[in-house]
C-alpha cells in the first residue's frame, strides 16, 4: 500500500484547508486510515481517523469540532477538512493505514500503523 498526502499550504489563522491522501495497492477498503501530524519540537501526534468500515470516525481533542475526516472508497481517497486553523495546527501532516483498523485504540497509536505516506506541510500564521 502506498499513500501520498497533499493539500497543505500556508494560511492565516481562521482559514480552512482540505488535505487529501491518495492510496494505491490491494484491498484498500480493508484499511483503517488515520491522520497524524508532526509539529516542531513535538512528538508525532494523532489527529483523526476513519475505520476500515467507514462507519466510525475519531478525533483528538485538539481537532474535534474543527476537523472532519472522511474517505471515498471509489476514488481511494481519504480527506481531512480542517477549519478554524490556528498556529498550533502548524505541522507536517501524514496519512497512515492499518489493515482492519476499527477502534480508536487501533488507529490513534502511530506504532500500530502499517503504512505511511510522505507528509504535507501546513503552516498557519496568526
Image (spheres, helix red, strand yellow):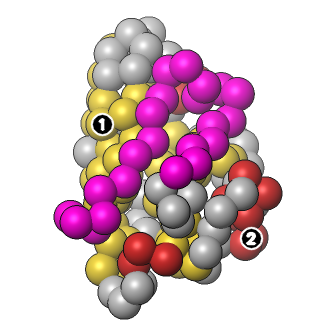
Q: Residue at x 41, y 74 (%)?
A: 29
Q: Is residue 123 visible?
A: no
Instruction: Say which residue label 1 marks.
Output: 18
Where is residue 109, by image quadrant? bottom right
What is the magenta range?
A: 55-76
The x, y position of residue 37, in whole percent, is 57, 47
Quadrant occupied by the N terminus: bottom left
Crowd tier of the residue under label 2, counting other residues whose Cα lies within 10 Å: few below 14, some 14–19, many 20 or above: few
72 shown above or below 96: above
Q: Residue at x 39, y 78 (%)?
A: 28
**Magenta-colored stretch includes residue 67:** yes
Q: Residue at x 40, y 20 (%)?
A: 83
- Is residue 75 shown left or right of residue 40? left
101 shown above or below 30: above
Where is residue 13, by image quadrant? top left
Where is residue 68, by image quadrant? top left
**Nearer to the camera, 35 or 40:** 35
- Is residue 89 shown left or right of residue 6? right
The x, y position of residue 74, in whole percent, is 22, 66
Q: Is residue 64 visible?
A: yes
The x, y position of residue 85, in whole percent, is 44, 19
N-term mark: 1 or 2? 1
93 shown above or below 30: above
Crowd tier of the residue under label 1, counting other residues whose Cα lies within 10 Å: few below 14, some 14–19, many 20 or above: some
76 shown above or below 65: below
Question: Which disc number belongs to residue 101?
Answer: none
The x, y position of residue 89, in whole percent, is 53, 29
Contact, mark 1 vs mark 2 (Cβ under 8 Å): no
Instruction: Say which residue label 2 marks.
Output: 111
Q: Secondary structure at mark 1?
A: strand
Quadrant occupied by the C terminus: top left
Amino acid at each position: 500500500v502506498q499513500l501520498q498526502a497533499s493539500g497543505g499550504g500556508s494560511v492565516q489563522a481562521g482559514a480552512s484547508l482540505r488535505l487529501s491522501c491518495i492510496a494505491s495497492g490491494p484491498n484498500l477498503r480493508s484499511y483503517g486510515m488515520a491522520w497524524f501530524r508532526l509539529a516542531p519540537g513535538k512528538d508525532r501526534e494523532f489527529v483523526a481517523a476513519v475505520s476500515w468500515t467507514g462507519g466510525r470516525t475519531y478525533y483528538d481533542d485538539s481537532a474535534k469540532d474543527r476537523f472532519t475526516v472522511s474517505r471515498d472508497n471509489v476514488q481511494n481517497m481519504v480527506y481531512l477538512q480542517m477549519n478554524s486553523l490556528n498556529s498550533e495546527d502548524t505541522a507536517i501532516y501524514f496519512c497512515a493505514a492499518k489493515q482492519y483498523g476499527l477502534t480508536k485504540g487501533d488507529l490513534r497509536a502511530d506504532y500500530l500503523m502499517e503504512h505511511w505516506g510522505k507528509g504535507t506541510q501546513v503552516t498557519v500564521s496568526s
